[in-house]
Amino acid sequence: MVSRKEQLANVERVVIKVGTSSITQGGSTPSEAFMDLVAKQIAEIKKAGIEVLIVSSGAVGIGLKAMNATPKPNEIPIKQAAASVGQGILMQKWNDSFQKFGLNVAQILITLDDYSDRDTVLNLNNTITTLLKYDVIPIFNENDAICIKEIGAAFGDNDTLSAVIASRADADLLVILSDVAGLYTANPNTDPDAKLIDTVGEITQEIEDIAGGPGTKLGTGGMKTKIKAAKICQDAGCMMIIASSSENDVISRTVLGEQIGTLFTADSAITKKRRWMKSAKSNGKIIIDDGAMKALLEHRSLLPVGIKFAEGTFEPGEVVDIECAGTVVAKGCPDYGSEDINRVRGMRSDVAKNVLGPKMKHKDIILSENIALMP
């Protein structure tokens, strides 16, 4: 059996997601001691030659406390105002902590639209690359202050956000720090026989069924969102670990290969295939709508309902461009040729099945593992 240390031996870039309950240590203000410990461990990891990005929660809860507002109000403007206040406080605290170890930080606030526009994605990736080159720690959060929809509606939670960032930044590992030690066979708070699951390969229905619900009152992420994040990471060829933030030196020990938390493995063959697709010649084009674009960003498969039309002539398995709003957002290898795709474009999968008959072996036009998002 391959050891955890061997599995993580080639990690070069890692994303660390720090949740609200971890940052506040169960309270409503940032814990200087905890943030100092995070900065210390990241400084140690960087000395080992590993690049680090952070996804930081906590802005809304911290802002609500500073404003003396009622926790978790239903009014979106109050949440947005709290996010604005909290982000300033949070970034100042992160800066203070990292400065103690000679490191600078950079704030990056993003929305789903930022990952829907190819030019914006290119600029964002260039910014990340430059920051890492100069040893600056990028710190991400969803831009709650300007979200048109309900806060968290775009990514749902920072677990999903961290997985999207890890996948688009070509990270090798995502570490989600939580108030739980990992994924258990049952709820450890109610079942004394619950056991920590060390490693998860395929995320089966059984794994999804044992995932818990929402967490603390100041945070919004539970185990279900972490499983969703793990699926996004696995589809991108990125490993993920859920670990307890209360574990001593959890970040450095986890990243450097100690047996801590639950590891969700990833198939390196998927990564290699996607890299090949990105550089391969395209034999045609599939035009998709905004709903399909959002699904691709979450590393889900392409269904016929989200397809506007197929352009050019191509056969099943050939590489094609996937275009949304005039921009090539991905490449993929469809299981169906252009003629059949145009026969079922815009249809629900069950209707498409009736049209194509036995030829349609599954509901997807392109499976998620056969889609490579463009930078």
Image: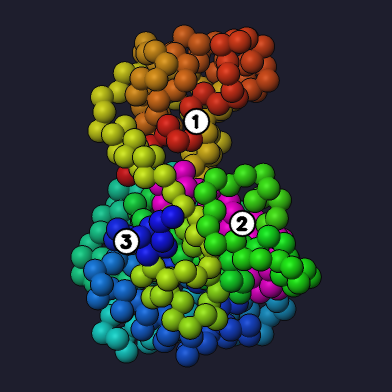
Q: Is residue 118 left or right of residue 233?
A: left
| Residue ID at (25%, 33%) | 279
Q: Is residue 290 above or below residue 128?
A: above
Mark 1 crowdedness (10 Å alpha carbons): few <14, some 14-19, many ≥20: some
Q: Quadrant of residue 148?
A: bottom right
The reply to whether discs 1 and 2 touch (Cβ–Cβ < 8 Å) is: no
Mark 3 crowdedness (10 Å alpha carbons): few <14, some 14-19, many ≥20: few
User: What amino acid is found at the position of numbered circle 1 in the picture?
Assistant: Leu
Residue at mark 1 = 367
User: What amino acid is found at the position of numbered circle 3 in the picture?
Assistant: Ala
The reply to whether discs 3 and 2 touch (Cβ–Cβ < 8 Å) is: no
Q: Is residue 361 above or below residue 291?
A: above
Query: Which label is found at residue 9?
Result: 3
**Magenta stretch contains residue 230:** yes
| Residue ID at (48%, 83%) | 248
Residue 333 image position (x, y, % from top left):
40, 25
For the residue pair 273 and 169, the one nearer the viewer reads as 273
Q: Label 2, secondary structure: give it.
A: helix
Which sits earlier in the primary sequence, circle 1 or circle 3?
A: 3
Q: Which residues are magenta?
A: 212-238
Which of label 1 and label 3 is nearer to you? 3
Q: Is residue 20 above or below residue 237?
A: below
Residue 87 image position (x, y, % from top left):
49, 75
Residue 41 image position (x, y, % from top left):
37, 80
Residue at mark 2 = 225
Q: Is residue 83 visible?
A: no
